[in-house]
Amino acid sequence: MPDAPLPDDSAARPGGEPPQPRGDKGARPDTPEPAGKTKPADAPAAPAAGDAPAQPPIPEDGPDDGAPPKAAQPAGPPASGPRPRKPTLPPGAAGRKPALPPTAKKPARPPGAKRPPVPQRARVVDPEGDGAALGLPVLTRKDFVSGSDVRWCPGCGDYAVLAAVQRALPELADNREDVVFISGIGCSSRFPYYMNTYGFHSIHGRAPAVATGLKATRPELDVWVVTGDGDALSIGAGHTAHMLRRNVDLNVLLFNNQIYGLTKGQYSPTSEVGKVTKSSPYGSLDHPFNPAALALGSDGTFIARTLDRDPKHMQTVLKAAHAHRGTSFVEIYQNCNIFNDGAFFDFTERETKPLRTVFVEDGRPMTYANGERGLVLDGLRLRSVDLGGERTEADCLVYDSTDKALAHIVIDQMFWDPDLPRPFGVLYQEDRPTYDALLNEQVEEVRRTKGPGDLKALLASGDTWTIE
Ligand SMILES: Cc1ncc(C[n+]2csc(CCOP(=O)(O)OP(=O)(O)O)c2C)c(N)n1
Ligand code: SF4
Ligand SMILES: [Mg+2]
């Protein structure tokens, strides 16, 4: 069963208040004690049961760099104490507005009183970018911020991803009504509540199935899938692979924190060997997935990797993913500061990042460490070399994201070889017809040649029996 209630219809409308979870179930983990490791010195104490739950700051505007808010306030998942309940409605009245008595009229506005503001429709972005000059309203980040309290732990990397998506969307979306976020179950999967767009917090591991159905029947919509390493790669692994091979035109954001966050810190399919958690007290024996390799092996047509702590890079990748027609698979390294703090610090912290990361760009040589090192191809093996002496930038491999053989080498070797840095950016892309386009073409073709069809007649055709 999903951990959070399914959104109801009324709540999923843009501008409407997304549904709130009933009680704390499914909202956030209620025990902050990280599994398998001692609590960091600055980790917050768990609020006593019955205390008011600590609310993380709502990232109204967020820091300008989109970085996650620091865990300065009373942090950690809230206590499982009671939360204020909505007044109980009479049976059958749920979801309905209290009706006015038949003869009752709306109270008249006193003379001279101002007319209440008319709710604004979502506004259209001028594709030429001169909307402001024409006096037209233009979508901004705020248009994509829902009124819901964000219920992630303070300091969680999810905030930075949310901010980056909300910042990128005004440039990508013509209007909010055509944008849909579909998620599975997990902390990351709470994402649709916080977007002022359509959304569906669906079933564990099944967001690709729901999204495929939606995109196939409403191809004009801009459909995003938000999922976690557990959601997409444990229970949903089969669905993820089929979505990729079909090349459904979806934008997939996989929040990889190498842990099950929502269920309080069990090891996940991306956790490293030896990971000590409550569910692996002697260390995990599982060989982890490399999500990008899984996507490439599933014949994915767009594969990228970015980081919560590099908001500018994340925005660039989001825009490239959105521009791609087909399944855009974006793996985002996301810090879970409660149950797996520092999993990606090698790639995000100032001291280690230059030596441990390469940001690939088409047509540019693969250099890193502030230009002091580079990557060369030695047969089918990548090697890291010092630059400035015998070797120069001109000797380095020039990246080409459309080269599948290169993508295999880069995605695989740079994940496992500790002497190689980790690659970020658009790692692979190709053009291939999308499933939704092919499906709709096929339906049109059959309609054209055979007529509109009759479902009842189809069901009653062939070998059917009447049971009397
Ligand atoms: C059918 C089913 N099995 C198991 C669960 C418990 N469960 C909820 S979320 C989750 C894993 C979430 O991990 P991930 O996708 O990595 O999300 P995160 O919380 O780390 O963002 C699990 C196992 C469930 N809700 N439903
Ligand atoms: S991913 Fe970790 S830090 Fe983020 S909300 Fe979940 S438990 Fe908290
Ligand atoms: Mg996770």
Image: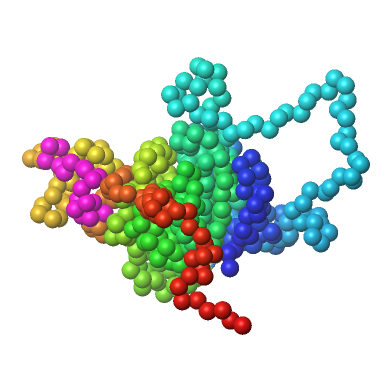
* Magenta residues (range): 393-411
Q: Is residue 9 above or below residue 387?
A: below
Image coords of residue 392 (percent x, y): 12, 37
Q: Who's the residue at 49% across and 62% down the image?
A: 206
Q: Who's the residue at 26% across and 39% down the image?
A: 361
Q: Is residue 1 above or below residue 252?
A: below
Q: Who's the residue at 73% across and 60% down the image?
A: 82
User: Residue lying farthest right?
Assistant: 103
Q: Quadrant of the N terminus?
A: bottom right
User: Can residue 155 be seen from the camera position used here?
Assistant: no
Front position in the image: 145 or 446:
446
Q: Quadrant of the C terminus?
A: bottom right
Q: In the image, is residue 140 part of the stretch drawn in magenta?
A: no
Q: Who's the residue at 53% across and 27% down the image?
A: 138
Image coords of residue 420 (percent x, y): 23, 52
User: Residue lying farthest left?
Assistant: 390
